[in-house]
Image: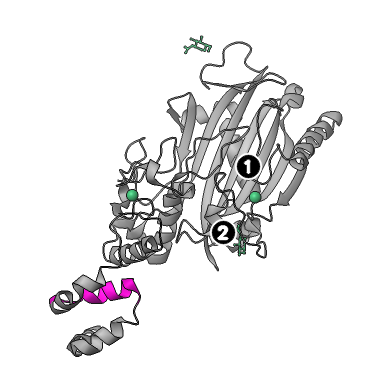
Amino acid sequence: MANAREAALTKLPLELLWLISAHLTPADFACLAVGNRHLLNSFSTDAFSKFSSVRTGTPTDYERIELLSRISRDIPQYYPCFICLCLHLWRKIQLPSLYSPSINHNISPRDLDKCHLIFELPLASYPSYTHYGFYFVHLQLAMRRFYHGPEFGIPVESLLYTEVGANILEPNSLLIQRDVNNLSGNPQRGVMLTLFSAETRICSTPPGLCMRTQDIAVVARKNAAWIWAGRGYAIMRVCKHINTLNSDFYDILNSQIKRYCSTTDSKAHADQGKCDECNTSWQLEIRTLDESRTSLTLTRWMDLGPGLSTEDVEWKYRLDCVVSTPPRQEPVDSRSRFEKESIQSGFPDALSEEAMYRRNVALLRGNRFQRVMTPVRGGFYILRGDSNTKTDSPGCLIL
Ligand SMILES: *[C@@H]1O[C@H](CO)[C@@H](O)[C@H](O)[C@H]1NC(C)=O
Ligand SMILES: *[C@@H]1O[C@H](CO)[C@@H](O)[C@H](O)[C@H]1NC(C)=O
Ligand SMILES: [Zn+2]
Ligand SMILES: [Zn+2]
């Protein structure tokens, strides 16, 4: 069938094809032009004249991306790069980590006018200050795999990540990040273990990559009042719109700790909410972990959108450097999207919210993380999820 149709099209008189081409988008016209040698000879000059050869900051950039996307459908190992408008091998992209994606772009960052192209998702805040550097390309490649198939991008399982760190805790002072293996001095007093975990799932209606992150701080129960050490110095944040610089969230956190410290019952105290600007849902909870320890947990749920363009509102307006505000839309509940509507939420091994907390604190219990996680430079430990594309080095390249 396809061949018959193709043959019919190429048999049309050139005049007719010219008439048709006037109705085609630049990407469609370019694809027609590469249909066969005859068409290429006739159309090449005109078909490619609309495309810039470098980023220009004008709408021709989008036409170039559109063309690269079409071409890359036939060569799955390449993806169209929104930064330099070239095709790169996607397996060269490092999984989210301390280091930025290890690609040499054909453009200097100085020449980029749009910060949301190159900046990472702002996830680091009190208490974990995670090193999980999640960039647009991770979102793009996870969704690309969902749209087109396994050879096109990163499986969500490989975005699963856990990190454990430690801090020396002093009331009302800056946190001092320390090597987890060297917490010399009195081991209980004045130490705060922190854990960050991230997990992504894919939602299909409408398509979007949903992320759940959890930040946990664990201190000795007698130091519970210090668990928000660094108040006045540090920022705990849900998103760029809700954080402890913003008085509501500051008050919620302070009153939760006060409530916890003033009662002897060890029941959990939780608050939750949602940001109407960027659809981030959150839950803040203080709990007695065991007879001697207390945990403070901030869980966040985000819908990072369809990953089709860096201009997607779900991506762009989350970044701190973007000062404009998104168009007003009906807000969405990112928490239920992740927990109930995602494809992975139906899987038998899907971790519920509570199971995730249990899994995370089990890593801290008896310093189990020192046995099951990988130590990395800087004195912290990380653990990545399984993936179909096995990583064979702690450098975490997808090979
Ligand atoms: C442990 O940390 C202390 C204080 O930062 C430092 O002086 C000491 O050299 C460290 N010990 C080791 C074995 O790294
Ligand atoms: C919030 O969610 C709604 C519904 O999915 C969507 O239309 C809107 O663009 C989202 N806003 C942002 C800033 O992500
Ligand atoms: Zn590039
Ligand atoms: Zn927000």
Residue density around tag 1, few if under 14, some if 14–19, many if 20 or more, within 10 Å: some
Q: Residue at x 53, y 48 (%)?
A: 199
Q: Residue at x 84, y 34 (%)?
A: 259
Q: Residue at x 81, y 36 (%)?
A: 255
Residue 281 among those drawn in magenta? no
Q: Tell me where residue 74 appears, x and y as whole percent.
A: 27, 66
Q: Secondary structure at mark 2?
A: helix
User: In which image quadrant can residue 166 be found?
Assistant: top right
User: In which image quadrant can residue 145 be found?
Assistant: bottom left
For disc 1, the marked residue is 357
Residue density around tag 2, few if under 14, some if 14–19, many if 20 or more, within 10 Å: some
Disc 2 + disc 1, Cβ < 8 Å? no
Left or right side of 29 for 35? left
For disc 2, the marked residue is 345
Q: Main secondary structure of the magenta part?
A: helix
Residue 27 among those drawn in magenta? yes
Name the amino acid type tagged 1: Tyr
| Residue 102 seen in the figure | yes
Q: Secondary structure at mark 1?
A: helix
In the image, the residue with mark 2 has its CB under 8 Å from the nearest atom of ligand 2: no
Relative height, residue 332 to residue 106 (above, below):
below
User: CA separation, marks 2 and 1?
Assistant: 16 Å
The foreground one among 325 and 319 is: 325
Name the amino acid type tagged 2: Ser
Relative height, residue 155 to residue 46 (above, below):
above
| Residue 5 seen in the figure | no
What is the span of residues highlighted in magenta in the rendered image? 25-37
Residue 98, numbered label = none
Q: Tell me where residue 209 appears, x and y as whole percent.
A: 51, 57
